Image: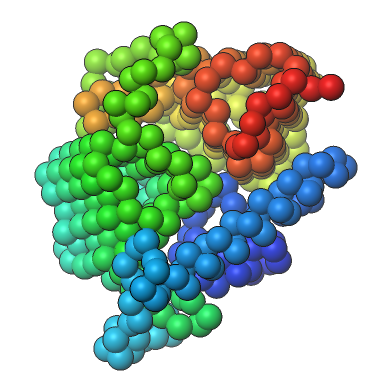
Amino acid sequence: MEYNEEDIPSSLKKLVEMYPLLKKLKFYNPYFFDKTSGGKNKEIQDYIEKTQENLINELYQNAKKSAGEEGKRKIRPATEEELEYYNKMTTDNLKKMEIENNLNILSTGLPEFKVLHFRHMGGKIGKKVMITYGNILDPYFPEKISIGDNTILGMGSCIFAHELIDGKLYVGDVNLGQDCLLAFGTVILPGVTIGNNSVVEPGILTSDVDQKTMTGGLMGNKRIKFEERKKKKPGEKRKTEDKPYTLHDWHKMMGNPIKFGLTNLFMAWAKSPDISNTFRKQLLRLAGIKIGKNVTIESDVHFDSFWPERITIEDGAVIKKHSAILTHEGLIDRVRAGDVKIGKNVTIESGSGILPGTEIDENVTIFPYSFITCNIPANTRVSREKTEQKE
């Protein structure tokens, strides 16, 4: 499956021209919406338009510099053999089918089988690597991707080894160290190296990461050493508890497989743009989510399917398309879970992510592309740049 041309906003055509594999991001895609998602709110419309414009400009400039000597990641023009191979894979019907098959196997199915399949494709992959759900590992140049032992690819995270700059094909090796974690929805660009024991939060990673470092944000510009994170006050932590297993015990996390299968069916159906808001809420209630009165939930919102009953959405809340509400997170050695409460009259704008253990009080506005990692007090506005009281 992939997005059709009409599904891609005109403001993001340049993004897809540079990274065509983004069209395959069906599981969780925080990018493919335009300013109309802001409804009649001109401030939100302008924010979306400006953010997308900056995103594309920064990605393009980063790519141009990386293709030269100034770049912070290592890419190079494809050789004639690589270009010929790529063109054949994108134009020959049998080769295109092979690409689709590889993508489908890596996106769905048993994690252990996906690791074996990626190895068979030519990728270099260590022991106890966890490929979860909805992942895209570059099927054109898998041999350029190396993943170290015990690394976790969160749901919907992607690794690209090729890109198109002004129509010209460039490639780059991607090296992930040992014990790394790619959070849900992360995109790793060609030519990036990530050191051991590092975490990449949702965003598009455009440069190398040192070991024992957390990075993230829409452009992956934020860098925090783990020793600096430990200095935070205890009160800033989210309320989560450890579960007695790791992601490798995914079959135990499912609980009753029939119930889990039905939950996923309801949630997949609820993402459809072809159903009403009323029916969508009925499906989500059947999955276990507690939903109040006069709540609006748009299509393509991703809700956690392992513990959906831990999500509460109170009266008058609005959740826009391409957002994600999570009640669990897989770390290297354990799984954490936590309740999520979305208070009365809260608006979560498109492309936002809500982590487990967070409580958003009433009358809060979460701006597009925000990543919520702590409790949010009432009557505030939260964006990637700042949190402030509403007037």
Between 124 and 217, the residue placed more toward the observer is: 217
x%, y% of residue 340?
54, 18
As drawn, 298 above or below 161: above
Residue at the (38%, 28%) spot, across then down: 329
As drawn, 281 above or below 302: above
The answer to whether residue 50 of the structure is visible from this angle is: yes
The answer to whether residue 239 of the structure is visible from this angle is: no
Q: On the image, which quarter does residue 364 sit in?
A: top right
x%, y% of residue 70?
39, 69
Residue at the (71%, 66%) spot, across then down: 10
| The furthest residue to the top | 235
Total of numbered circles in the picture?
A: 0
Judged left or right of residue 389, residue 61 is left
As drawn, 105 above or below 328: below
Judged left or right of residue 150, residue 259 is right
Judged left or right of residue 68, residue 13 is right
Between 344 and 200, the residue placed more toward the observer is: 200
x%, y% of residue 390?
79, 22
Residue at the (53%, 47%) spot, across then down: 218
As drawn, 132 above or below 94: above
Residue at the (36%, 12%) spot, across then down: 241
User: What colour scheme has been applied to the protein in the rendered image?
Assistant: rainbow
x%, y% of residue 98?
33, 72
| The furthest residue to the front | 70
* Placement of the C terminus among the 4 image quadrants: top right
Between 300 and 262, the residue placed more toward the observer is: 300
